[in-house]
Amino acid sequence: MEMALDETKRGRLTKDGIRIYEPEDFAGMHTAGALASRILDEIAPSIVPGQTTAEIDRMITRMVEDAGAKSATIGYKGYQHASCISVNHVVCHGIPGPKLLKDGDILNVDVTVIVDGWFGDTSRMYVAGSLSRKAERLIQVTHDALIAGIAAVKPGNTFGDIGHAIQKYVESNRMSVVRDFCGHGLGRVFHAPPNVLHYGRAGTGAVLEEGMFFTIEPMVNLGRPETKVLADDWTAVTRDKSLSAQFEHSVGVTAEGCDIFTLSEAGKFHPTWG
Ligand code: MF3
Ligand code: CO
Ligand code: CO
């Protein structure tokens, strides 16, 4: 009798419990990541004042279905939407709803899809209408902090190196890194070890190895880092009501550095004003 192969348990685990995937697994992650990213490309023209976040989420739901994929978030711990949409002082896990976007709102849209069992998780910032200087700075710094974190991804570096690069960049711009939420391993599952902290000390934490798949998704506040979760049990907001931004990529460690699974083929990951 053969044991049924548990498809979620590919490759091997490190002593820190981090899964090491095989070279052939990168292709599945690229396909899933590309779909999540293309969805974020395609909603961009719809993010305008007067639009509701519920309608944006409906578009996303339809695109996931049309691609023959599955939403990872619908049904996840009771969550009922294909995206999280976090407006202004919402840090993450904003629930799509009937409220109208207004001129100057900034928002993060976070989409996770499952294609052939592989998870692609990415989020980016948008603006409805006109952008204030301070919001533009926040978005730019958050984007560049993610890129600084990704630049630290290579075998032999540690997860602390990633967090440190992000924190140093953000704080040198007099903004703060959210501590209450972190990135995560993913692959054949949505959330797996390790917790990918967006702050920390260089040289600490687990050592990166080729074949690790995880997200980096820093949340950055203009004010203080503290957050609280609203009574709906999902929506996380800044305690001081300051503006918050986030960008997220799913990446895989390669021999040389890393592959970004959720790149925008159309070059739209970063908003085009910059
Ligand atoms: N996509 C989010 C992440 O980056 C998780 C959202 S879970 C949900 O990890 F249930 F809120 F959708
Ligand atoms: Co994520
Ligand atoms: Co996400």
Image (cartoon, grey):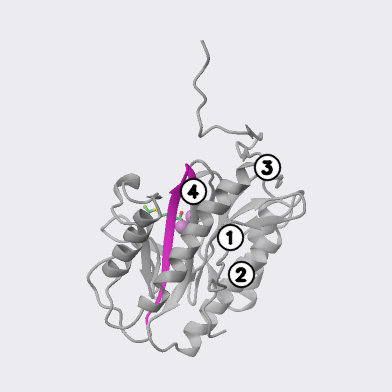
Inspect the magenta stretch and tell me whether residue 180 lies in it: no
State whether residue 196 appears in this view: no
Q: Earlier in the sequence, mark 4 or mark 2?
A: 4
Instruction: Name the kind of residue labelled 4 in the image.
Output: Phe
| Nearest to viewer (mark 4 / mark 2) | 4
Proximity of marks 1 and 4: CB atoms separated by less than 8 Å? no
- Tell me the number on the disc at residue 145: 2
Q: Earlier in the sequence, mark 2 or mark 1?
A: 2
Question: What element does badge 3 sit on?
Answer: loop
Residue highlighted by disc 4: 119
Question: What element does badge 2 sit on?
Answer: helix
Question: Would you call the spot at circle 3 few (<14 residues within 10 Å), some (14-19), or many (20 or more)?
Answer: few
Q: Quadrant of residue 174?
A: bottom right
Q: Position of residue 86 (x, y in %)?
A: 38, 68
Residue highlighted by disc 3: 23
Q: Residue at x 53, y 46 (%)?
A: 186
Instruction: Name the kind of residue labelled 2 in the image.
Output: Ala
- Tell me the number on the disc at residue 198: 1
- Real-space Cα separation, disc 4 to disc 2, in angstroms: 23 Å
Write down the region rendered in magenta. Answer: 105-118
Instruction: Name the kind of residue labelled 3 in the image.
Output: Pro
Q: Earlier in the sequence, mark 1 or mark 4?
A: 4
| Nearest to viewer (mark 3 / mark 1) | 3
Image: 146 above or below 200: below
Q: Is residue 80 left or right of residue 73?
A: left
Q: Position of residue 207 (x, y in %)?
A: 71, 46
